[in-house]
Image (cartoon, rainbow, N blue to C red):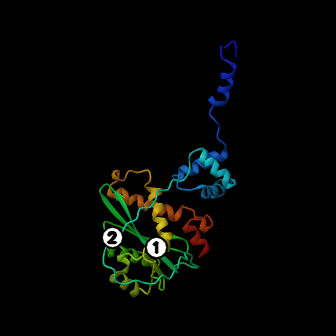
Amino acid sequence: MGALGVPRANYYRWCTEGVEKLLSAEEEAIIELCKRTKYRNGHRKIKALLKQEYKIQLNRNTVQAIMQEHNLQCRIKPKRRWKSQGESIIVAPDLLKRDFSASKPNQKWVTDITYIQYGSTTKYLSTIMDLFNNEIVAYKLYDHQQTPLVIDTLKAALAARNNPEGVIIHSDQGSVYTSYDFQDYVKKNYLISSMSRRGNCWDNAVIESFHSNLKSEEFQFTKFNSLSNQEVKERVIAYLNYYNEERIQEKLGYLTPKKYGVIAA
């Protein structure tokens, strides 16, 4: 070192700091999982995916530490509230009472509307979820939030599930759901209407949480004014497919809604 004219302290600092740290197999697997899932998952789900896909078993604190070290934490944006429009007529009682479990398919459905803004335009997404496996049964994406949006979503759900009868369809007290047209359609198809208490988002928390995740996971890195109408539609469809077929859930034993539906039904 003296012959090279390099001070001993500088040499050892170069040895410890100048050489890039080699990643372990566990770190490489975690980084790959986070990239592939677009940083949508927290450490608990990454821990489950490590075991499922790589046969790597780590405790969640280790997984969390690795994710923090490499800045791989899940990013979630807060949800913005909106108000529905239209005339309120019929209010149904709350039959779920925050019991978001179901012992079989087509026992309890929950539904809600959320907005997706791009540029100066807003799209309205209506979805219906089956609480048996949290699968999104049907959706509609319209330029308005009027009653036809929710009726068409319910029509699509009934068609997808071969017109089951006696299903509880739970919503908030938005005017599109309390409208005579929607309630009449529910009754004519032998469904049972249920509604959250007014102004209480926790009474319909599961579907509201889904909408929040959709926007924070699919659109968080995108400037809304950079998307076209068609691009918004394509990204919503892509996320719904990902959610049903790829996104694991702790409630479902770290299975996807589709896989849980096949195994548990």
Q: Position of residue 79 (x, y in %)?
A: 44, 61
User: Is disc 2 surrounded by few (<14), some (14 to 19) or many (20+) residues within 10 Å?
Assistant: many
Give amino acid for label 1. Asn
Using the image, determine if residue 212 lies above or below residue 149: above
Which mark is on residue 200? 1
Which mark is on residue 181? none
In which quadrant is the C terminus drawn?
Answer: bottom right
Q: Residue at x 50, y 71 (%)?
A: 202
- In which quadrant of the rendered view does residue 116 lie? bottom left
- Tally of marks: 2
Q: Residue at x 29, y 56 (%)?
A: 120
User: Which residue carries the number 2 mark?
Assistant: 145
Q: Position of residue 96 (x, y in %)?
A: 52, 80
Pick whichever, 165 or 12, lies toward us: 12
Q: Residue at x 46, y 59 (%)?
A: 78
Pick whichever, 46 or 156, lies toward us: 46
Q: Position of residue 30 (x, y in %)?
A: 61, 49
Mark 2 and mark 1 residues within 8 Å of each other at the beta carbon: no
Using the image, determine if residue 19 lies above or below residue 26: above
Is residue 33 found left or right of 57 in the rendered image?
Answer: left
Return the disc, 2 or 1, that comes first in the chain's sequence: 2
Q: Position of residue 147 (x, y in %)?
A: 33, 76
Element under label 2?
Answer: loop
Q: Residue furthest front?
A: 199
Using the image, determine if residue 148 lies above or below residue 81: below
